[in-house]
Amino acid sequence: MALKQVQTTCAYCGAGCQIMFTVDTATNKIVNAVPAMGRTNQGTLCLKGHYGWDFINDPQILTKRITSPMIRKGGKGSRLEEVSWDEAIQYVADNLTKIKKKYGPDSIMCTGSARGPGNEANYIMQKFTRACIGTNNVDHCARV
Amino acid sequence: MTMGVHEIEDAKLIFNFGYNGADSHPIVQRRIVRAKQKGATIICADPRVTECARIADVHMQLKGGTNIALVNAMCNVVYNEGLVDQKFIDEKTVDYDAFVEVIKKYTPEYAETICHVPAETIRKAARMYAKAPSAMILYGMGVCQFGQAVDVVKALGSLALMTGNYGKPASGIGPVRGQNNVQGACDMGALPNNYPGYQNVTKPEIQEKFEKAWGVKLSNKVGVPLTHVPQRVLEEKDPKKQLHAYYIFGEDPVQSDPDAEEVREALEKLDFVVVQDIFMNKTAEFADVILPGTSWNEHDGVYSCCDRGFQRIRKVLEPPKGVKLDWEIICEISTAMGYKMKYKNTEEIWNELIDLCPNFAGATYAKLEKYGNIQWPCRSKDDSDKGTVVLHQGKFANPDGKGKFYTADWRPPQELENEEYPLSLSTVREVGHYSVRTMTGNCRTLRNLEDEPGWIQMNPADCEKLGIKHGDLVKVVNKRGWCITRCNATERVAKGATYMTYQWWIGCCNELTIGSNLDPVSNTPEYKYCNCRVEKLDDQAKAWEYVNTEYKSIRERMGIKMVGKEAV
Amino acid sequence: MTENMSCYVLCDPNKCTGCKACELACFAEHNKENNDVAYTVGTVTIPVTPKLYLTKTEKYCMPVQCKHCEDAPCLNACKKHAIYRDENKQVIVDQSKCIGCKDCVMACPFGAISILPVSDNGAVLLQKDKECVKAASKCDLCTGIEGGPACVRVCPNEALRLVDLNEEQLAKSIATANSLYDSRLS
Amino acid sequence: MRQFVKGNPDLCIGCRTCMIGCVVEHEGRRIFEIDPDGYDFNPKLHVVKTAKVSVPVQCKHCENPACMAACPVGCIKVINDAVVIDQKECIGCKSCMQACPFGVIDVISQVGTSQSDGSKRVVANKCDLCVGTGNGPACVRVCPTEALKLVSEEAMQESVQKKRVATAEAAKAIADAMAD
């Protein structure tokens, strides 16, 4: 076992608790999670912080981790088919471009995410919406 | 929040309004408990006996949907009994007289008829709040998730203004933001009216700055709020305003948005739906394209916690084969559409954005490493600028530097109880599950602790009337939809009111919630009030069979192979 | 008028010398019949288990014992109903019902209860696993014993006395009335 | 005196981190690896919520345990001064559950066991103070608000002694007042 420790911020609420993960780099699995000393959490965690990490090993309990881009090639209602990243990116780009041309940029809506992705990904999403698509139609699930 | 989470435990008085930290942020509730242990006075306004209400010196158990009447009445007492901080009002605020005109009507006796809180209790709470050397207001979704929400926030702000409770340690007003990075998504401009750093899209000088930075012409038209999407798809007649494509990133509106049926209809009608997520979810079932991103623990970055604190997140594990970093996916699509975006890593993105946002400019990765947590505003890259704990010190962020008084008359919720649907229904939080539960529902012990079909919290007297016992399966129904869940008979809720948490597939309360009554400013739906009826299910065995079969079938749709797995 | 109140033994720490005569007398009095404990130490075959506890501070000492509270926290805390109030309003532990859960020890604000071994027939009682039986032990005012509390009787310095507030209160209130009458004249 | 874990309702926020901590401590970290249906989730303490109180409730480790006295097969034993149920010997007769005045004994079914008729074994379950783990009670360690405390014999005696000294001091004040 090759163990390393990484400190990060808990993703389960706005308290922003610091967690220290121990990882087995050989198997790429989390071994342990313990509270770290953060400004807000002072070495404490709640149940989600202590025990909310085993989803990451895709345990197939509630839903399956998505590990490949998928497209409904046969249109609405057809089966989702796994495709390559190149195909998926091009497919999205083509369709969005088509809709933008036909109905204008304000016919497209994008969301950021108040959950796992982080600030940089949100910045990129709103920049994409505003600079590439050309609309301010970007929002996120702040009101949930 | 205008203050820091760590300051809560040093408060002399905490006025906790519609905020249930014990279930939504246990580690913030910990500070409230510590404050109480250190001698703080606690006032709690909540229709339920929450953990905070339980330890409060005064608990105002108001009827749901009457928030502003209660706040106005407290302001009325403070005004009539001369408990105001006149010097603060004279020097640092505007619009006091207009505000007083509104609150005059809200005597505690009048408010009692609306809120069902005894007038003397309102007086007692108002006096306690006004006389405390410093007082902190914490509020949560119990304030925000109503058709009349922003009014209440402003009224609470006015209560703090009239007593001079700003700009000193352990004072002010704190919206304790729910999700881990809701503050961050707002900070980053994932909002229809703001660029990153709360810079308004309608201001020409701001538009010009971003056009220059991004090298492209930008729109100055405020965009569509998320909660308007179903209406813009299903009902909008003006072709220019109709939505045709929806790129959903790290969200599950079918589960989390009100009136699930309406959301499903909208997704079906849209020409093109992209879902970028880590797990299969109910929204992904309507996607034309699914793009697998990375999970928390698989990427680097920064989150903003509820008190404006930037903190690093770090890659703990290598992501599985086949997925891509979220920002990489978006950059590649953008590039394929002709607007080139390319970055080496999150730090490069971060550096671009903090240079565009004066309030974030000083919070470099190097400083985040060094200090661990930086509360914005942090304007200078110099090591000496460690951020700002308390906002509004000296002057307010308004253009004239003054605090603005405002309140409004009470408006009842849109959909009230009636003969057919005699109970009220409000959505609340489940402590062991996060959001739509695709992550925590896949965690073994958290699933063990609470699982389908969830609970509906009801007063024992209401249960008795219906002949149902704690633990019985019941049907909850109103004109928009229905679901099946378990009865949780508890004296912690008032007669006539019911409460459900929103992450269950079977006990899915968003089949019933109301999507049309949005706050006019924040566009937040009225998750906290609609009507419903609870029905007894005579054949419990059959009902359990329905729950188990349905659970199994949804899990199968979500890609779980049920072979060898026991039914729930 | 105040309810009829229970009595209790109170010590004057100014008189107490810490000789422990009270503890031994208490132990002997309660174990005379079942355990053959006489007044000399040589006859004792079982652990010494008093119902009052000599406590020393830096400056003085005294035995601490039950105040027979009117709203007794120990009685209210006991889930086994092993603590009851007798006909004289004294708070009594029925050791045969006690399971040694320690709730009464925690509840008592005076430290007047300890968990101690229980003996019978000259030997410590044993549980199934050979551990000795332990039970809450506290002052019962020597209820049913002739002559009243043994501790009061044996104290060489007359530091302990049985307090009957019903009588004292009456005497005090009469004295107050008298003094009011006297002061009226002046 | 035996030590025990005591919950403080003034500090408890009802989050039930202690209940998961208890299961993880007793099942071991394999819980995060194995099939989620491959183990039982049987906390040895339970958070009770009434209108006035939220607090975890668990075994007091009585000096003369009523459960032990009631057990007909002698499977409740004192190990390292903790009252512990030997679940391998338990016959699931529920006598201990009935005898316990605190309602802190559960009867649970055990995954991976079977009786002659094929049904799972059902046994008594209660707090064992995490005896044998060497880490002390997990519930105390994981509680985010420090609402659980291990009350040791020393702590208990110290607290009683403090109360006795305070009682003596009060008696001194009474004596002085009466002497005046």
Image (cartoon, coloured by chain):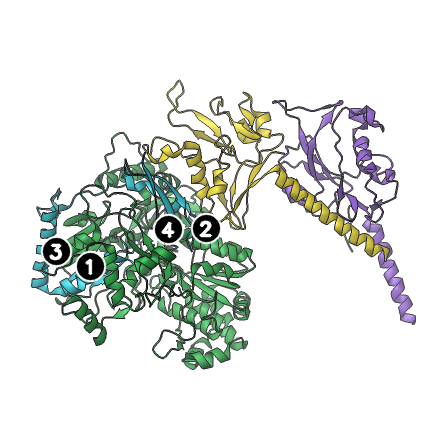
Q: Nearer the viewer, mark 1 or mark 3?
A: 1
**Residue nearest the observer in this picture, C128 or B414:** C128
Element at label 1: strand
CA separation in Å, label 2 and label 1? 41 Å
Q: Check the residue under mark 4 and report the chain it is in.
A: B
Which numbered tag is attached to residue B459? Answer: 2
Q: Which quarter of the image is occupied by the N terminus of chain B?
A: bottom left
Which numbered tag is attached to residue B112? Answer: none
Residue D121 x/y as whole percent: 42, 24
Element at label 3: loop
Q: In this structure image, what is the colour of chain B? A: green
**Residue nearest the observer in this picture, C63 or D39:** C63
Of the numbered discs 2 and 3, the one sitting upstream in the chain is: 3
Residue that label 4 marks: B500
Query: Horizontally, is B473 left or right of D178 in the view?
Result: left
**Chain depicted in cyan:** A
Figure quadrant of residue C95: top right
Residue that label 3 marks: B271
Mark 1 and 3 residues: CB-CB less than 8 Å, in contact? no
